[in-house]
Image (tube, grey):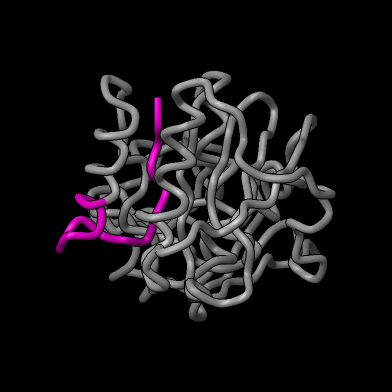
Amino acid sequence: MIVLFTDFGLEGPYIGQVQAVLQQQAPGIPVINLFSDLPPFAIQGAACLLPAYTSGFPRETVFLCVVDPGVGGSRPGVVVQADGRWYVGPNEGLFTMLVRQSQQLECWQLAEPEGVAASFHGRDVFAPVAARLARGGKVPGGQVPVRCLEQKDWPDDLCRVVYIDRFGNALTGVRASALAPGALLEVNGQAVKQARTFSDVTPGAAFWYANANGLVEFAVNRGRADEVLDLKVETVFNIVPRS
């Protein structure tokens, strides 16, 4: 299958144009929208979501990953093979956490084809490569060191809201496994305790929990965490030290 992980949005022509290329060049191969509404241009937050939400897919899945504010510039396109899965996209830091959390890694740098639109590499460069890999084709590029994918100064865990879902739950860039059980978090002057799941707190109560993909997530039972805790993408929070 080919899985989309982009900030293109579902409105307008962009995701449809990408899907049309995939349909033409890899007919019969399922295309799944995993994320098409990632916060625009927010590479570091998307990098935290990428390994958490793709690790459960089978080997040989092809992920088309595009958060690309540097489109048309000097940043190269890459193909990454991580633990048997394929990832295609621009090299602007998006694959940093994937590299750190994967065991088996290889990387290839893509040459930019002639005559492509400078502003839409997702459609004209990366989608054709994703289709080619999904058909079992070879990577059209030369192998490069995996270290070129990392942003060395980025932390392993990002104490920041990186995505808000339609329920108002706020996903963060922190792996729940990085926190001590029962850790207390502070955001916008409010202390937030851990709970196992929604039904473990009273209606209207805010809490944080380890979500189904292993990330710390702020939530409210039968309510919206973004409203109750005044959360937005990029809101920073703190881990309260134990006394």
Magenta segment: 1-17
Q: Is 68 positioned to the left or the right of 240 in the image?
A: left
User: Magenta stretch: residue 8 in it?
Assistant: yes
The residue closer to the viewer here, 53 or 6, is 6
Q: Which residue is found at the position 38% from the left and 55% from the top?
A: 124
User: Magenta stretch: residue 111 in it?
Assistant: no
The residue closer to the viewer here, 39 or 157, is 39
Q: Is 26 positioned to the left or the right of 93 in the image?
A: left
Residue 196 in view in this figure: no
Q: Quadrant of the N terminus?
A: top left
Residue 66 in view in this figure: yes
Q: Is 105 positioned to the left or the right of 78 in the image?
A: right
Q: Which residue is found at the position 27% from the left and 19% from the top?
A: 28
The residue closer to the viewer here, 41 or 69, is 69
Q: Which residue is found at the position 73% from the left and 48% from the top?
A: 178
The quarter of the displayed image where residue 199 is located: top left
- Rendered position, 101 above or below 94: above
Q: Which residue is found at the position 40% from the left and 36% from the top?
A: 3
Residue 239: give x, y in percent of width and height.
68, 65
The quarter of the displayed image where residue 12 is located: bottom left
Residue 192: give x, y in percent of width and height.
51, 62
Q: Is 161 positioned to the left or the right of 229 in the image?
A: right
The residue at the far front in this view is: 114
